[in-house]
Amino acid sequence: MRQLTILILAVLALSSCKVFKSNLMLKTPRDFNYDRLIDSVGNQDYKLSPNDAVIYRVFTNDGFKLIDLASTSNNFRNDVEVIVESDGQVKMPLIGRIPVEGLSIIEAEKLMEEKYAEFYVKPYVSLKVTNKRVIVFPGNTGLAKVVTLTNNNTTLIEALAIAGGIPEDGKAYKAKLIRKNPNPANKPLVYLVDLSRIENIKMANAKVQAGDVIYVEPRYRPLRTLTNELSPIITLITIILVVYQFTLFR
């Protein structure tokens, strides 16, 4: 029993080490300085980025016949997909390659309309990104999802809802939003969002960008972990003791 007690105490001493928290990801030190998710950042419209697949439609005359679904004589071309290349540009018919990385959908549409004005009367451009994705770790092992966003301006709380919400073992008060820094030379932006408090609803309604990582830290259960780790050891010791007692009384 003395040896078993020593073993249990040793396991408890190690319970704070990474051996017992091996599933925790994206950990930050206690004194980590999180970036501030202010309104000017949280309310930013979706920004185009490399590898975005964009469906575009170009119409003339301010899209006058856009509502006439039976007529295609007034549009340049329908539902054609282009990819934002690694240099942040897209290759468009007639107007060639234009830079769109970092532009909102509205800004990119306006830029293309200006370019197409050289060839068409009052061009009307409609863009839609079809492969926007964020990675969501909702706070429990095996529940991570890559979420495809169909809405141009999906919010943080919407992305979590699409992924199934925060499970029982997730810390709603410790959700991290990790975003690529506009300056590639700098570290990623890391925002801490407390979703457990209603007054933080503004932060919950921040618009996510392509490639964002939403990580809800899972709750650590030391007693359950300790039980799982000790169970096979206790079983083995019990078997050894039974065998030992059996040999003594033979």
Image (cartoon, helix red, strand yellow):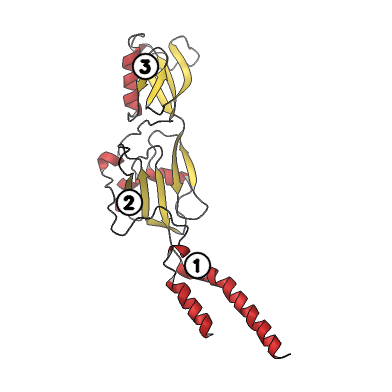
Asked if marks 3 and 2 touch (Cβ < 8 Å), the reply is no
Task: Out of 240 and 133, give the one closest to the viewer.
Answer: 240
Q: Where is mark 1, residue-wise?
A: 225
Q: Amino acid at mark 2?
A: Leu
Is the residue 149 above or below the residue 4 in the image? above
Check disc 1 and report its element: helix, strand or loop.
helix
- Labels 1 and 2: the sequence-earlier one: 2
Compared to 199, does 50 lie above or below? above
> What kind of residue is marked 1?
Thr
How far separated are the C-alphas under marks 3 and 1?
60 Å
Mark 3 in CB contact with mark 1 (< 8 angstroms): no
How many residues crowd mark 2 within 10 Å: few (<14), some (14–19), many (20+)? some
- What residue do we see at 50% from left, 67% from top? 225
Q: Eyeballing the image, is 73 above or below 128? A: above
- Quarter occupied by the N terminus: bottom right
User: Which residue bears the numbered disc 3?
Assistant: 124
Residue at 47 percent across and 41 percent down: it is: 147
Residue type at mark 3 is Tyr
Frontmost of labels 3 and 1 is 1
Between marks 1 and 2 in the image, the one whose residue lies nearer the viewer: 1
